[in-house]
């Protein structure tokens, strides 16, 4: 195997979105164009309800997919299609905006800890104006494996291969073939994972520290990996938790404005006009 090396470390930074929800933005759509097909990754987490109580009131999307993974807490999804979902601790919401969706994500708790991630994955031009879709994935539907050394792997999307076993995640997509793993690496543990050559690969450490390709990566850092066919991770002396993300690049132009991601500026202008005139979801 050819292990991937760390090409860059990106630190997350505090910001706010929705109705004042405090979060850490790892990279925004403009900055992630070189990380095709990934567009955005946010981490939210707080014990203070004032930091999240405003939630994300109704807002539109077009041209990409949103993946919300909840570590702790509860949120309620509603959209113009009539979908209503309850996102609970350990669960995932996978939404394909396609040609247009208007949805809300609001807290279903008045106190306690809320923590999780939202990831945006681009859609190819041929699918940007396709039908929107929504899926709630409960925690029990996410395959989980405990490996030697106490390593825990949750397979949210894609296929996890280890010791001759292939585990198919809760979600599989054809165009971008995303791999989305939540990994817990205890101290002194080690794990080598195959990752398709040519696919963009990222590791975001969110608790403790993880050694990625020999480089110690602290929490709230995103490691951008070079090419190769394997990712080598170690728990080090401290141990840590991390997300491993990989996907097939689309190699298409990206035009972005707020909640819309298309291929050209003209398509962005059309999305804005469609939203103003009520045709976004038509």
Image: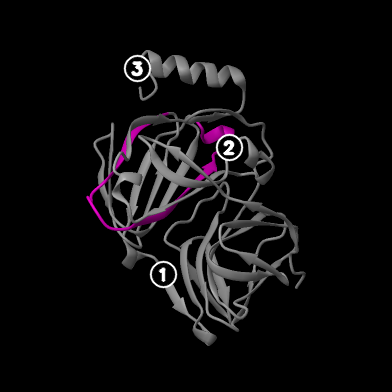
Q: Establish if 106 lies above or below 216.
A: above
Residue 58 image position (x, y, % from top left):
32, 31
User: Tag count in the figure?
Assistant: 3
Q: Quadrant of the C terminus?
A: top left
Does the stretch in magenta take in 200?
Answer: no
Per the image, the residue denoted by label 3 is: 278
The residues colored magenta run 100-128
**Residue 150 visible in image:** yes
Label 1 element class: loop
Q: Establish if 240 lies above or below 23.
A: below
Q: Nearer the viewer, residue 198 or 216?
A: 216
Dot label at residue 29: 2
Mark 2, Cα crowd under 10 Å, few <14 / some 14-19 / many 20+, is many
Q: Earlier in the sequence, mark 1 or mark 2?
A: 2
Per the image, the residue denoted by label 1 is: 143
Residue 75 image position (x, y, % from top left):
29, 49
**Residue 69 visible in image:** no
The answer to which image quadrant residue 246 occupies is bottom right
* CA separation in Å, label 1 and label 3: 40 Å
Dot label at residue 111: none
Q: Establish if 20 lies above or below 72.
A: above
Q: Nearer the viewer, residue 141 or 4?
A: 4
State the residue at coordinates (24%, 36%): 82
Farthest bottom residue in view: 148
Q: Nearer the viewer, residue 130 or 146?
A: 146
* CA separation in Å, label 2 and label 3: 25 Å
The answer to which image quadrant residue 97 occupies is top left
Indicate which label's residue lies in the foreground, 1 or 2.
2
Q: Earlier in the sequence, mark 2 or mark 3?
A: 2
């Amino acid at each position: 195997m050819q292990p991937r090396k760390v090409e860059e470390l990106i630190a997350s930074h505090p910001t706010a979105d929705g109705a004042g929800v405090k979060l850490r933005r790892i990279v925004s759509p403009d900055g992630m164009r070189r990380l095709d097909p990934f567009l955005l990754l946010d981490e939210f987490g707080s014990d203070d309800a004032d930091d999240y109580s405003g939630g994300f009131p109704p807002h539109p999307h077009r041209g990409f997919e949103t993946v919300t993974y909840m570590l702790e807490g509860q949120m309620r999804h509603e959209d113009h299609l009539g979908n209503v979902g309850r996102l609970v601790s350990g669960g995932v919401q996978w939404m394909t905006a396609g040609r247009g969706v208007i949805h809300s994500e609001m807290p279903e708790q008045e106190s306690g800890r809320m923590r999780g991630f939202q990831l945006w994955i681009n859609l190819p031009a041929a699918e940007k104006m396709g039908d929107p879709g929504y899926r709630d994935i409960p925690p029990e539907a996410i395959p989980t494996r405990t490996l030697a050394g106490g390593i825990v792997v949750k397979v949210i999307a894609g296929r996890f291969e280890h010791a001759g076993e292939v585990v198919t995640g809760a979600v599989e997509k054809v165009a971008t073939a995303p791999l989305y793993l939540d990994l817990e690496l205890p101290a002194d543990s080690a794990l080598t994972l195959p990752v398709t050559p040519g696919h963009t690969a990222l590791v975001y450490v969110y608790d403790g520290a993880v050694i990625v390709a020999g480089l110690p990566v602290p929490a709230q850092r995103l490691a951008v990996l070079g090419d190769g066919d394997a990712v080598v991770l170690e728990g080090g002396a401290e141990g840590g938790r991390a997300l491993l993300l990989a996907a097939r690049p689309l190699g298409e132009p990206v035009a972005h404005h707020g909640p819309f991601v298309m291929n050209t500026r003209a398509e962005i202008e059309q999305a804005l006009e469609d939203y103003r005139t009520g045709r976004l979801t038509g």
